[in-house]
């Protein structure tokens, strides 16, 4: 693989890490949930859900925007934020593999337990 190919792979991996990093924080997960339940919200409406100021909430939103999980739109002097859930599909795909893995393991364990019954 050439240097350009490696750069593309690394950029792709960085994007994945950004999504995982973004959802690792409970405050950001709560922001995503709030935005999922609404069309769009301004910063001041989001801030009332947290025991922190606008600056801190804004920093969390910036991380979510970098991971492409939140989109923003200017309306006059106000910025409205909305969920962009498409990057979460990668996380869902990753989790679904392990969900199947554990279901298969539990079925195998269940079979073993049934074979051991007198």
Image (spheres, grey):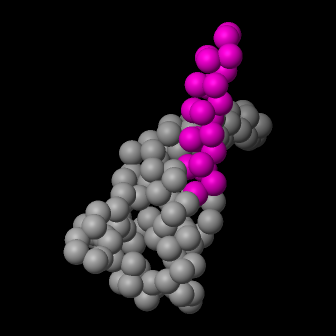
Q: Nearer the viewer, residue 84 or 111?
A: 84
Quarter of the figure that contains the C terminus: top right
Give left or right: position of 106 versus 91.
Answer: right
Which range is magenta? 1-22
Number of on-image labels: 0
Whole-percent x and y of residue 14?
A: 63, 40
Q: Quadrant of residue 28?
A: bottom right
Nearer to us in this view, 113 or 92: 92
Determine the residue located farthest toward the left in the rendered image. Answer: 76
**Which quadrant is home to the N terminus?**
top right
Q: Residue at x 51, y 63 (%)?
A: 62
Q: Residue at x 44, y 54 (%)?
A: 69
The overriding secondary structure of the stretch rendered in magenta is: helix
Q: Residue furthest front?
A: 77
Does the magenta segment cover residue 42? no
Residue depicted at x 52% and y 77%: 57
Residue at 54% over, 87% down: 53
């Amino acid at each position: 693989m050439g240097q350009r190919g490696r750069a593309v792979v690394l950029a792709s991996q960085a994007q994945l890490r950004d999504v995982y990093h973004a959802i690792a924080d409970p405050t950001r997960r709560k922001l995503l949930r709030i935005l999922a339940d609404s069309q769009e919200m301004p910063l001041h409406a989001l801030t009332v859900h947290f025991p922190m100021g606008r600056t801190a909430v804004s920093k969390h939103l910036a991380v979510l925007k970098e991971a492409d999980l939140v989109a923003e739109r200017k309306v006059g002097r106000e910025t409205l934020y909305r969920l962009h859930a498409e990057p979460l599909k990668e996380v869902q795909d990753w989790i679904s593999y392990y969900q199947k893995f554990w279901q298969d393991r539990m079925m195998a364990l269940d079979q073993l337990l049934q074979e051991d019954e007198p």
